[in-house]
Amino acid sequence: MTAGRKPLIAGNWKMNLNHLEAIATVQKLAFALNDKDFDRADVAVLPPYTDLRSVQTLVDGDKLRILYGAQDLSSYDGGAYTGEISGAMLAKLGCTFVTIGHSERRQYHREDDELVNGKVLAAYRHSLTPILCVGEGLEVRRSGGHVAHSVAQLEGALRKVTAEQAASIVLAYEPVWAIGTGEVATPADAQEVCGALRSRLAELYDGEVAAAVRILYGGSVKSDNIAGIMAQPDVDGALVGGASLDAAEFARICRFGETSG
Ligand SMILES: O=C(CO)COP(=O)(O)O
């Protein structure tokens, strides 16, 4: 965490919680957090597509300070693409964010850097803020190639992205071996890669862009390990999977593990 960048804690629900459960979870989260918490950190949920309209209605109706977004989008803007969801549709639902290039999409849906790049450009066409995920698997980590791997994914995703666009992106470093495994990277592991991503942004664009971008860590984040992660200078928040499904636990994470807001 570094002064000047507002931390962001985002809950990636993955394929969990239907639209009724979504309403209950967001209501509980809103009840657990106060204005001080929202002044200190941005809080976002990333529900399945089918929940978004319900979340929008609740957030608008109750004027909640919770932000929300989708877990993916199409690289196309509309037309005969069965099963796809466009950036325009997400923008119409009031989404702030869209997750792009999550390792589960790369792994189970064979998304490569070119498609991820197309999705990043699609997000910007519709004024959505990408949460671009990068991170290495266990083999790459064991061979010491984690920094090069993550930086290469960053470069692949940012082709044709302007400096003005890049300044608003959110990056998430998620080492695949730490996702859903209970195996959390050490704060130093998180800082090493997040620092390298920021340095590369400075080379690709300039120091101003690099200083503006929020970089999150993701992988088995819980209320009892968030504080050490947030203490790192180049880590500006967390992308939380499993622990974001429990509103009380997620609220504790949004407070960086501290007991009062
Ligand atoms: O993939 C993640 C968030 O996008 C991390 O998931 P877990 O927090 O369940 O390890």
Image: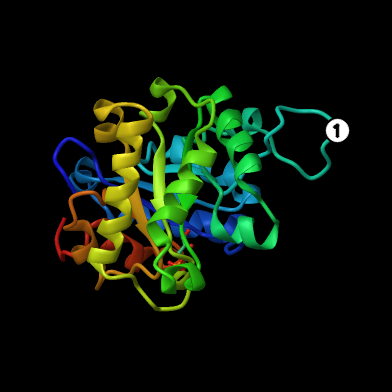
Q: Give the class, few, some or many, for how many residues have Cα within 10 Å of label 1's Cα (few <14, many ≥20).
A: few
The one nearer the camera, 231 or 11, is 231
Q: Is residue 190 left or right of residue 74?
A: left
Question: Residue at 42% across / 48% down in the picture?
Answer: 151
Up-down relation of residue 117 to residue 151 (above or below): above
The one nearer the camera, 27 or 48, is 48
Residue 22 % position (x, y): 53, 56
Q: Is mark 1 within 8 Å of ligand 1?
A: no
Residue 132 seen in this snapshot: no
Q: Quadrant of residue 226?
A: bottom left
Q: Specify the color scheme.
A: rainbow
Q: Is residue 15 left or right of residue 259?
A: right
Q: How many marks?
A: 1
The one nearer the camera, 85 or 192, is 192
Residue 32 % position (x, y): 29, 58
Up-down relation of residue 192 to residue 4 (above or below): below
* Amino acid type at mark 1: Ala
Question: Residue at 72% across / 31% down in the picture?
Answer: 76
Question: Residue at 63% across / 34% down in the picture?
Answer: 118
Question: Residue at 29% across / 34% down in the picture?
Answer: 210
Q: Which residue is mark 1?
A: 80
Q: Quadrant of the C terminus?
A: bottom left
Label 1 SS = loop
Residue 78 % position (x, y): 75, 28
Residue 101 seen in this snapshot: yes
